[in-house]
Image (tube, helix red, strand yellow):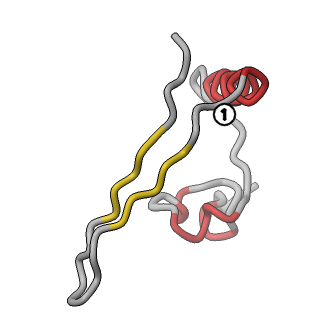
Amino acid sequence: REPGGGLLLYLGGREGRLPTERVQDPLGREAAEALTDRVVDAGRATVGPSYTARVGPWCDHCGVRSSCPAQPEGRQVIE
């Protein structure tokens, strides 16, 4: 199926803020293939009983940081 684009609706939430819409045009063939490759790679990276922990900007918001081997506080006592 060909991608059809996207529409995000941001609700106001705060007093005086109105809902807004952001529209994304459909992806072209190259962008769609790149996205598919990225999703497939992500799936392969997490298959199996273990996977490689990587540090990145997402770490600041991670709920399991304290048990992550990529973080100082998540490493085993004896290495």
Question: 16 and 65: which one is in front?
Answer: 16
Task: Judge left or right: residue 64 versus residue 25.
Answer: left
Mark 1 is surrounded, within 10 Å at the Cα level, by few (under 14), some (14 to 19) or many (20 or more) other residues, namely few
**Residue extending farthest top:** 1
Label 1: which residue?
A: 51
Q: In this view, does 44 lie above or below 54?
A: above
Give amino acid for label 1. Answer: Tyr
Residue 44's spot in the image, x, y percent?
Answer: 67, 21
Q: Residue at x 55, y 15 (%)?
A: 2
Judge by depth and name the residue closer to the eye, 61 or 9: 9
Which residue does the image show at 61% across and 70% down from the upper left?
73
Left or right: 23, with 42 as reference point: left
Judge by depth and name the residue closer to the eye, 16 or 37: 16
Q: Is residue 75 above or below residue 3?
A: below
In the image, residue 3 lies at what x, y percent?
Answer: 54, 23
- The C terminus - image quarter: bottom right
Residue at screen point 68% across, 65% down: 57
Q: Residue furthest bottom?
A: 15
Q: Where is residue 52 in the image (x, y as percent from the top left)?
A: 72, 39
Res 63 → quadrant: bottom left
Q: Which residue shows up at 68% across the image and 64% down it? A: 71
- How many numbered tags mark residues here? 1
| Dot 1: element | loop
